[in-house]
């Protein structure tokens, strides 16, 4: 099985690298660029947004190859649901890039993606009441898809943050045996490869962006991975109005930078009586730049911060059967500290 993983990574990386290089060298008239160039952004909107195209084509290639690796996997609910939601998310993002679609359209597609996952048995289990599980799943899918889109505001940041999560889950699966998770592992490895090749062109100073077609692709995969490997990683031992402290902590640790940035931006904009969904230069990443950190260092900082959170999340998963709830505060220290430092910095540092 190891050779399949290695081959998947090499082929996906080289194919994605070639595709990105091919697309970026095409004449300007063939470039796909943001339709809404007047939006408030940190960087120029004139660069091509091919990143999502390479993500999706590598995904398609991977799904085709998987058909030949495991008998009848085509008919599995997970395979079908992943193919549908990833395709819908990519096409929705691409439509928004080209046509500047309405937020309502994107919101509806995101809900449809959540419902497809729920229908195929992929949903968050946190309550004895199914309706609550379904509601939290919908909120999670919509939230993560919008969070990664909001975090895509500076060269390399959203790619590096997503990469930390996919790499951590892949390592966890390999370390714990992946015989029953071959579909997940191959998809994760191919996505890691396409992200690394994309970072070759997206690292500051970038030559291309991923666009909404790329951020929505990553968003739905992150939401799926979050449900399967973090929300549902531990057995339910406490039901109290649908609240399970350990589950929320694990997710907070694993998706630390996404949750922190989205929450910070939402709070600050609401305090200024502005919509959280309109672009701006007030993200935690921007304020680190105003503090004096170079753009490429900020991407590394977010990768490291989230990677540490992921290590703690998997430690908590491994110790979930032995750790007492009274000891959870030790694991809360890190994410709360990171959140407060990044949030306070948005109040201290000023736009250049």
Image (spheres, rainbow, N blue to C red):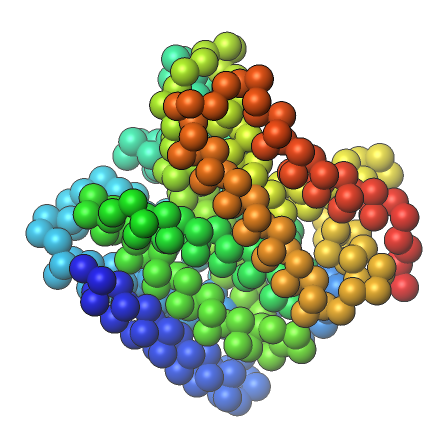
Which residue reaches farthest top?
Answer: 240
Residue 218 location (% of width, % of height): 47, 54
Q: Quadrant of the C terminus?
A: bottom right
Write the residue at 83% across / 42% down: 344
Question: Which residue is at the front of the view, 277 or 43?
Answer: 43
Question: Which residue is at the front of the view, 105 or 113?
Answer: 113
Compared across the picture, whether 96 is left or right of 227 comes to: right
Compared across the picture, whether 234 is left or right of 219 comes to: left
Asked whether residue 85 appears in the rendered view, the answer is yes
Q: Quadrant of the N terminus?
A: bottom left
Write the residue at 29% across / 31% down: 121
Tally the numbered discs.
0
On screen, residue 110 above or below 43:
above
Compared across the picture, whether 260 is left or right of 54 comes to: right
Residue 276 location (% of width, % of height): 72, 42
Task: Name the image quarter holding residue 236.
Answer: top left
Which residue reaches farthest left?
Answer: 71
Task: Name the image quarter holding residue 78.
Answer: top left
Asked whether residue 138 appears in the rendered view, the answer is no
Compared across the picture, whether 346 is left or right of 86 comes to: right
Write the residue at 57% across / 48% down: 308
Residue 266 location (% of width, % of height): 73, 39
Write the residue at 70% across / 62% down: 298
Residue 46 location (% of width, % of height): 67, 75
């Amino acid at each position: 099985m190891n050779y399949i993983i290695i081959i998947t990574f090499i082929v996906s990386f080289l194919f994605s690298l070639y595709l990105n290089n091919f697309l970026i060298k095409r004449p300007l008239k063939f470039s796909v660029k943001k339709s809404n160039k007047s939006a408030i952004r940190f960087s120029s909107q004139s660069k091509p947004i091919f990143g999502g195209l390479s993500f999706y084509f590598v995904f398609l290639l991977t799904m085709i190859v998987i058909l030949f690796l495991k008998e009848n996997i085509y008919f599995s609910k997970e395979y079908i649901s992943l193919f549908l939601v990833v395709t819908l998310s990519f096409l929705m993002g691409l439509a928004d890039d080209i046509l500047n679609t309405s937020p309502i359209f994107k919101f509806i597609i995101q809900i449809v993606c959540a419902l497809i996952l729920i229908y195929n048995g992929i949903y968050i289990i946190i309550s004895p009441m199914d309706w609550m599980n379904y509601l939290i799943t919908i909120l999670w899918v919509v939230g993560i898809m919008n969070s990664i889109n909001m975090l895509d505001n500076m060269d390399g940041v959203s790619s590096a943050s997503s990469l930390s999560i996919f790499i951590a889950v892949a390592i966890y699966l390999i370390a714990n045996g992946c015989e029953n998770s071959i579909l997940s592992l191959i998809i994760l490895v191919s996505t890691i490869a396409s992200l690394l090749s994309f970072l070759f062109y997206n690292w500051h100073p970038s030559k291309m962006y991923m666009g909404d077609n790329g951020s929505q692709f990553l968003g739905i995969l992150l939401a799926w991975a979050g449900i399967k490997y973090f929300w549902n990683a531990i057995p339910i031992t406490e039901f109290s109005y649908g609240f399970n402290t350990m589950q929320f902590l694990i997710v907070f640790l694993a998706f630390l930078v996404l949750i922190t940035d989205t929450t910070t931006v939402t709070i600050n904009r609401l305090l200024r009586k502005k919509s959280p969904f309109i672009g701006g230069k007030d993200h935690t990443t921007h304020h680190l730049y105003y503090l004096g950190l170079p753009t490429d260092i900020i991407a590394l900082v977010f990768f490291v911060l989230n990677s540490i959170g992921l290590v703690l999340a998997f430690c908590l998963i491994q110790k979930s059967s032995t750790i007492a709830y009274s000891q959870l505060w030790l694991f809360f220290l890190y994410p709360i500290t990171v959140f407060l430092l990044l949030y306070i910095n948005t109040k201290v540092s000023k736009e250049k």
